[in-house]
Image (cartoon, rainbow, N blue to C red):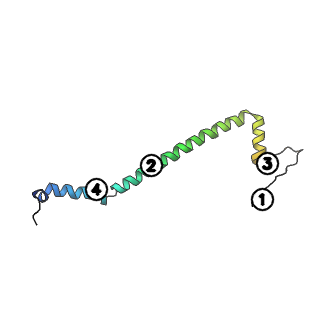
Amino acid sequence: MKLPKITKNFFFLFSFFFLIWMLFIDANDLVSQIKLKNQLETLEDEKAYYLQKIEEVKKDREELLSNDQLLEKFAREKYYMKKESEDLFVVVEEEK
């Protein structure tokens, strides 16, 4: 079997093995780069989601701190707070 002359060239062989090494064997190979890119996109999506949630919480906090009636309603519903002259009944529905 006769090989093409270019395959006997040192620079061709070196370049070929270097390419194989960088694509499949190295720690920063092609598969790892694709996985890291996908992970980065996922993390950026999560970052955007949490930044949006932080803005919503800040907005809700400002509303609560600026409106006493809303703050009282929130405290009563969330933490079951009551006035001293009131009785509190918590109704729990049974799951079927």
Q: Please tell me whether mark 1 sits on a helix, a strand or a loop.
A: loop
- CA–CA distance between discs 3 and 2? 42 Å
Of the residues shown, which amino acid type is indicated by label 3?
A: Tyr
- CA–CA distance between discs 3 and 4? 62 Å
| Residue under numbered circle 1 | 94
Residue 22 quadrant: bottom left
| Residue under numbered circle 2 | 40
- CA–CA distance between discs 1 and 4? 61 Å
Q: Count how many numbered circles sit on residues in the image.
A: 4
| Residue under numbered circle 4 | 22
- CA–CA distance between discs 2 and 4? 21 Å
Residue occupying the point 69% across, 35% down: 63
Tag in front: 1 or 4: 1
Q: Earlier in the sequence, mark 1 or mark 4?
A: 4
Q: Which mark is residue 80?
A: 3
3 displayed left or right of 31: left
